[in-house]
Image: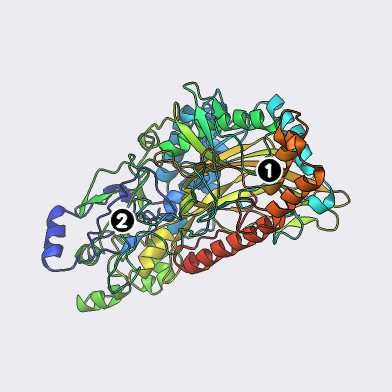
Amino acid sequence: MSDSEDDYQPISPESIKEMKARGYLSEWHRPVEKPTWTFPSPFVAYAALDNEEVVWGPPPRTLAELRMYALSWAIRSKPQWRSKIEDTAILEKWRAEAVDQQQGLLKYKKLNKHMINYVLTELPAYAALADNEHGIEAGPFDAIWYSDSLIPDELTTGLRKAALKLEDVPDAEKDWHPGSNGLVLDLVHPSLYPLLYDRTRALDGIAVKAPTQQSMGFGEPPSNSYGDQYNNIADNCISAQYSWLPSDFAISSDGHARLISPYINNLHPELHRELYPLIEQIVGAFVPMFERVLSQINGEDRDLLRFEQENGLEAPGNGRIQTQLVTISRFVGQANLFYGLAPPCIWAEQSRSIWAGQRLRWPEEFSTDEALCDAIQSFPRAHKKYNGALERSISPYSLRGKTLQCIVKLANIHLTPDKPSYDGGSWHVEGMLNERIVASGIYYYDEDNISESRLAFRATTSSPPYHHQDDVLCSEILYGMFRNSHCVQDLGSIETKSGRALAWPNIYQHRVAPFSLKDTSRPGHRKILAIFLVDPSIPPIPSATTIPPQQADWAAYAMEQAREDEKSLFSKLPVELIHAIRQHMEADCLGRYLGRKEAEEIRLQLMAERTVFVKGREKELSMSFNMCEH
């Protein structure tokens, strides 16, 4: 790799002013107005541009940045990596391996020596960020955290034992998730018995009204001739019919969680009382991990790695990558001096005609786009070593002393010799805007006889900034984005082995990778407990604290228990009347309670509604909301 990148001089302020005066930079300045709320949402526009258009994600990371993340994660996935980074010989071995593994790649796809050195010198910063008490470490990308020791062994054993009671039911009562081909067993799922707007009654007896864009604090919908084109809320992301129902947990100053709601939806507080303290402890264990997730997305930090442009001028580079904006005149005038070092940014496909207009000969070596890309050796640039960007990405956010709203889910994937493989899930984020989910946490508490499975992440981005609409070649080189392709970038993946806890922000889409039986002659399984965290910075949404249980069988159980109490009036009622009351509750489709049959029908309607949203936004945002079981 050439060292000539050190000699490259950035574009001067005088050149920028001259180009602006001549009208060459009409699309140069695209200011980003970041959201005013604390935490970003996948359903709310990330930013507004100066032409009033909204974008649904931050600017894309360069491919070089993403490759640096991948190299760092490959190293940090090694056993005892934190002790190994203190050995100079091992570091040099990793350096040599990083170079060797790039053999055969085009030059512009390779990490240069500064990029590799930055990754290696950044490793101590990752080690310093680790929470040794809870075993929490940074994952494959910003705001993704994991731990293999977050949950104590005795708590895991208790969870496995208590959850068996949910599994050990007659086959006719097993709740196989719709559309899962009998592979995904729902034990506790928020889509069953959800809040029903205009029907579900709060404690005051008044039916809960559906939220609107205005009532949720996002202003009036647009009323211009473009319809919803510039609306900062995604179409159909606010349900007028359903919402998942969280439970409220009080977090003490030392991070312990205490359930203050009378129940967790779909988990009977009496029949499964042994699960309640276990879930409390697990929610509490996730507090420091959720704090780390929120601390990297709370809107106060600067973009971790991006070299920012301010008012069209180069700003000091705080991150790993320094992208360069190159003028036409500089590219043409200095072509002989900096041969092949400047890509055709800004003008892209028009570059050959510009050379012709300048009466300069287009080098034969650049007769194809591939050859030109291959000649670009110093683009983009990187700092020579780590510069503290990782620490600057974190603005501590505490959950201590707060009341957290959490949606709890328990689900298993069961494989058998007849059904030996799971094909994986679809890309999705959790919930809809109604639920205001800001982060997800999953604990993989049990598995047996299955191959390695991974959870992959990707993010929606805006289109590449500071580039002309015809700047196809440069966008491909820098970001791997092609004309008319989705603005999404892969962020890496992590193994989801038993005992591992993960947490990440809901702005990232995620997808379960396929896995299968190791030994196809016997069954296997994987079991998870998921916690979906509602945005703690907003007023509380309706929860199990304000919404009484809607399960008709819960009410019937309460009546039967009361009938055994001689002091209760129910003890005076004949059994036939109790049964008649129960049948009425389950059959009354407009009543306060939901029978099992109606609840399952509503679940299908809820899933269908969210599928409509998915199809309506998938092409724009490339996100999916199909119910994935992690």
Position of 122 with respect to 18 (left or right) is right
Position of 37 with respect to 101 (left or right) is left
Q: Nearer the viewer, residue 413 or 544?
A: 544
Q: Nearer the viewer, residue 313 or 340?
A: 313
The x and y percentages for residue 270 are 70, 33
Where 611 sits versus 164, above or below? below
The x and y percentages for residue 397 are 40, 32
Q: Which amino acid is tagged 2?
A: Gly
Q: Residue 598: which quarter of the image?
A: bottom right
Is label 1 in a helix, a strand or a loop? helix
Res 150 visible? no
Dot 2 crowding, Cα within 10 Å, few <14, some 14–19, many 20+: few
Q: How many marks?
A: 2
Name the residue beneath numbered marker 1: 555
Q: Nearer the viewer, residue 153 or 355?
A: 153
The x and y percentages for residue 430 are 54, 51
**Which residue is most to the right?**
521
Dot 1 crowding, Cα within 10 Å, few <14, some 14–19, many 20+: some
Name the residue beneath numbered marker 2: 219
Position of 549 with respect to 11 (left or right) is right
Is label 2 in a helix, a strand or a loop? loop
Q: Which amino acid is tagged 1?
A: Ala
Please report the residue visible at 12 percent of the width from the left and 59 percent of the height from the top: 17
Q: Residue 48: which quarter of the image?
A: bottom left
Q: Residue 607: which quarter of the image?
A: bottom right
Res 542 visible? yes
Please report the residue visible at 25 percent of the width from the left and 74 percent of the height from the top: 355
The x and y percentages for residue 403 are 47, 32
Please report the residue visible at 49 percent of the width from the left and 21 percent of the height from the top: 254
